[in-house]
Image (cartoon, helix red, strand yellow):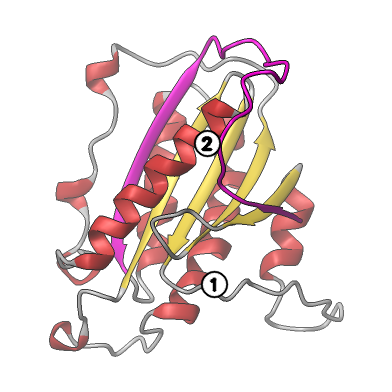
Amino acid sequence: MSNEGFGSYDSHEQRKPAPNWLYVSSLRLAAVGTAAGVARMFVRHHLTYLGMSEHIADGELVVSELVTNAVEATGISDPAVKLHDIQAQHLVAVQLRVVDTRLFIEVWDRSLEEPVRKDVGENAEGGRGLVLVEALAQRWGVAHPPAGGKVVWAELVIGKVPAPRGPFGNRPRLEQRVPQATRPLQGEAFELASTALLERVLEGLRGI
């Protein structure tokens, strides 16, 4: 696990070459139990578009665990939740970021409390979330963007530069396909999530 802060870049430090390939897409969701399923769809559609179908299974598992943790931390996990119970603060956000041959899956929520990796027995029925993420990802960690909240991220090595299927304008646009019960309300959390994920992209570029 890695803890990341956000700070200024020292121009005297040696910088790595700029990436040859960068792809970013994000989606905001109501922090309810169905968010994990929509997040899996988000990852599946984007990886299919990028010609990275062989990484869909791992990507879906990782995003599902991270979103489930975020919902448990700040949302409503009751499967019988009613629409009128969902408030603007019940929001999580998912971001998929590809930098050359590295795939980052990032999930924002408004809680500052960091997730804890728990060792579980072989016969345990639950609690494997971060253990599974750790097994599938090259590394994972928690970042605290200036906007607020936290971003839990996982990095997967994809081994090759993506080969998109069609022009960039044909990339998946899933906002209108999100079920009504999983659409977030506009509010402060929506703006915080958008800013925090953008800060994550910019911080990643500064570190290159």
Return the x and y of residue 30 as percentages of the image width and height: 28, 69
Other residues around mark 2 within 10 Å, as few (<14) / some (14–19) / many (≥20): some
Residue at image x 14%, y 48%? 176
Q: Nearer the viewer, mark 2 or mark 1?
A: 2
Q: CA distance from mark 2 to mark 1?
A: 24 Å
Q: Which mark is residue 69?
A: 1
Residue at image x 48%, y 53%? 145
Mark 1, secondary structure of its residue:
helix
11 in magenta: yes
Q: Which mark is residue 140?
A: none
In the rendered view, tell whether residue 118 sits above or below residue 25: below
Q: For this view, does 111 lie left or right of residue 83?
A: right
Q: Quadrant of the N terminus?
A: bottom right
Q: Which mark is residue 203?
A: 2
Q: Quadrant of the C terminus?
A: top right
Return the x and y of residue 7 as percentages of the image width and height: 57, 43
Q: Amino acid at mark 1?
A: Asn
**Magenta-tinted stretch:** 1-30
Residue at image x 52%, y 55%? 63
Mark 2, secondary structure of its residue:
helix
Q: Main secondary structure of the magenta part?
A: loop
- Identify the image quadrant of residue 126: bottom right
- Identify the image quadrant of residue 105: top right
- Identify the image quadrant of residue 199: top left
Q: Amino acid at mark 2?
A: Glu
Residue at image x 30%, y 76%? 90
Q: For this view, does 4 lie left or right of residue 119?
A: left
In the image, 22 versus 182, the foreground residue is 22
In the rendered view, tell whether residue 185 sits above or below residue 15: below
